[in-house]
Structures are given as structure tokens and as C-alpha cells.
Amino acid sequence: MINHQWKLARTPQKGWPTDGDFIFSEALIPEPAHMQLCANTIYLSLDPYQWGRRRSGTEAIGEVCHGRTVSRVITSRHPQYAEGDLIFNTSGWQDFGLVGDDISCFNYMFPRVLDPGLAPVSTAIGVLGMLGLTAYAGVYLQCQPRAGETAVISAASGGVGQNAGQIAKIKGCRVVGIAGTDEKCRFVVDELGFDACLNRRSPDFQAELTAACPDGIDIYFENVGGPVFDAILPLLNKASRIALCGLISQYGNDDPASGHEIWRRSGAATFTKQNVIVHSLFVGNFVAEYQDQFLQEMSAWLRDGLIHYKEDIWQGLEHAPEAFSAMLKGDNFGKTIVQVSAL
Ligand SMILES: NC(=O)c1ccc[n+]([C@@H]2O[C@H](COP(=O)([O-])OP(=O)(O)OC[C@H]3O[C@@H](n4cnc5c(N)ncnc54)[C@H](OP(=O)(O)O)[C@@H]3O)[C@@H](O)[C@H]2O)c1
């Protein structure tokens, strides 16, 4: 068998991914050394931060593209893993990867064996994985929602956003989502149980957001930045809290003043006047202390039907760049996953 791999062809400098950024290549299936295993990728997670790694040069040219995965162990020389185990790991954009005990900044979640009885294993890269923990950390641990408060979530139908809104709802908030199409907004209200959801592309977006938040905004879960953030600013209540999770509208922007800096500058006056607390959110800071608590609580919510999730699954590793680009542009509907091989 052949190990198909997507490698980074060049360091992308501007805009969104293009065809020349990636090379599809073939390699032999790797042989695990002592304390390693070889795993066959089933699900590959595509996430916005991967674009940041590529654009910043963190991912080297010629390297297999990084990505978290759900895989099946095919050969194990590690005592904790048996052949046939389904695991969460970080094999990247390829059919087969080696897994060891190594850990790095972007691989801060240790490989772990999954229990298919708990939930479908694809949730290990979604609602029960990094995305769920990000939402849990931002909404629950950082913003500490109180019943009756208004929470607004941008990219509300996406991987992180859908969890963030549902957690705020469980904690008793009135939850307003923001998404990029009417279809996404209907899903967010009808299937996820948000109280309202607004299309960020509507010409009356600011007025609609103001009407949907008659008591102002107490919690804002920031995923996107740009014009959505501009519409949020005038509605922030005194002592409101923001979880600064991401600014995806800026990730393809070449203006050196884009991103966090311009976001802070444009919000500064409101933050001071309204005593807004801005929490910088990096999920890696919550893994060691909160992963077990999160998994326990989130699994229970899933089991009790309090959390629903939507996955946007593409079939075939060959489609990874196309799916990645679609997700960055907002053409995804739910958590973006590539199914690389059969479960
Ligand atoms: N801080 C952390 O530790 C951490 C961890 C994970 C993820 N994140 C961040 O969380 C955010 C969501 O990530 P995700 O993996 O869940 O992706 P996602 O929400 O599933 O997909 C990205 C979404 O961003 C929205 N979007 C894209 N371009 C936009 C634009 N120009 N303006 C407004 N919205 C735009 C689109 O939603 P609509 O078209 O529906 O608006 C798109 O569906 C990202 O900013 C990511 O970087 C942060």
C-alpha cells in the first residue's frame, strides 16, 4: 500500500490557499520504532489555525501538512496501544502516520485511545476535542455566564461556535448567533436551540443585531473580527466579557496592521468606557488542567441531548486543500472534516 501525503509546496504569503500551495505525493508506509505505532487515518480535522502555521513559516516547505486525526492503529510497538485501537492523534494530511509520546506546541493533546461507545469517534476532533474544549474554556471558564445574560456567538454554525452557543444556553443565557447564510441561521435556531441568529451579510445587519439584543450584550465569543466586531462594539454592556477566540476574517489579510492589534485599537475606547473584560483564549492553555473535567461534562451533555453538532465531511484525502479553502472562506457548514479511509 502507498501512503498518500499532502505536503506544503511553498510558504503562502497572501490571501487564501491556492493550488500551488500544496503537493500531493506518495511515500512508503512508515515502520514504527520502539515506543511508536503506525496508524491509518480515518478522519482528518481541518482548522483555521493550520493556515496561520503555513503562512508564518512554522510549517516547513516539504513537510507533511499538520492536522489532528482520528486513526486506527495498524502496527504497535508501544505498550499502551494495541492494533485495531481507534485513537485521537496528529498524523497530519496523510494516509498513515507514526505516533509516539512526543508533544509540541501544536501537538499539545496527547494521543489517546477512543471509546466508540461514548460517541462517534469523529467527535474527538470536534465537539469532544479541541473545538469543544475551546468553546468550554471561552464561554464557561473565562466568561463565567450567568442565567439571563445575553451571549452573542460569531461563526455560530462552525466547529467552535456551535459548541460555544449551546454551552451558553445550558448556563441559562439568551443566546444570539451570527452566521454567513440564512440556511446556517435556520440551523442554529432550529437544531442548536439558539434564541436568534442573524446573517452577517444582511444589509440591515447592525439594526437586526441591535433588535436581537434589546438588553445589550454581556458575553461576546469572538471568532471572526472585521465588520462583525464593529457591529458588536456599540452593544457591549458595562462589565461585559469577550472571549477572543479567533479573527478569521483577517487570516488572509496582508495588512500588517490587521488582526489582534487593529481589533484592540478599534475596541479600546469601548473597552475602557464599558469596563469590558477581554479574555485572550488559547485552548492549549486549558488542556492539562481542564481536559478531563471538560470531557466528563461535555460527554454527559451530549448523552443527555443538550449538545448537538454538525459535521461537514468531505470524502477522500485528495480533497483536503479544496475543503480547507472552503472552510476558510466560510463555505463550510459545520465542523470541517475529511474522511480519509473507512471507519
Ligand atoms: N483560540 C483558540 O485556541 C482557538 C482554537 C480553535 C479555533 N479557534 C478559532 O475559532 C474560530 C472558528 O474556528 P472553527 O475551526 O470553528 O472554524 P469554523 O467556524 O467551522 O469555520 C470558519 C467560519 O468562519 C466564518 N468566516 C470565514 N470568513 C469570515 C469572514 N470574512 N467574516 C466573518 N466570518 C467568517 C465562516 O462562518 P460564517 O460564514 O457562518 O460566518 C466559517 O464557517 C477561528 O477564528 C479559529 O481560528 C481558536
Image: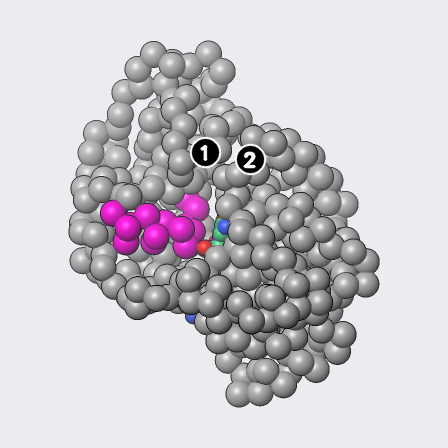
* Residue numbers of the magenta segment: 44-57
Is the C-beta of the residue carrying label 1 under 8 Å from the nearest atom of ligand 1? Answer: no
Which one is nearer the viewer's eye here, 108 or 194? 108
Q: Residue at coordinates 54% horizontally, 57% vertically from top-left? A: 244
Q: Is residue 228 above or below residue 290?
A: below
Is the C-beta of the residue carrying label 2 under 8 Å from the nearest atom of ligand 1? Answer: no
Q: Residue at coordinates 74% horizontally, 55% vertically from top-left? A: 145
Q: Residue at coordinates 53% horizontally, 26% vertically from top-left? A: 113
Q: Position of residue 103 (x, y in %)?
A: 41, 28
Amino acid type of the residue tagged 1 in the rendering: Tyr
Task: Judge left or right: residue 330 versus residue 253.
Answer: right
Q: Position of residue 243 (x, y in %)?
A: 59, 56
Please give the residue where the numbered disc 1 appears in the rendered image. 108
Task: Judge left or right: residue 163 versus residue 195.
Answer: left
**Which of the numbered marks, if any, corresponds to residue 287?**
2
The residue positioned farthest toward the bottom in the image shown? 203
Amino acid type of the residue tagged 2 in the rendering: Val
Q: Is residue 89 above or below residue 204?
A: above
The span from disc 2 to disc 1 (Cα, nearest Å) is: 8 Å
Asked which secondary structure carries label 2, the reply is helix
Please say if the residues under marks 2 and 1 sit with CB atoms less than 8 Å apart.
Answer: yes
Residue 211 visible within the image: yes
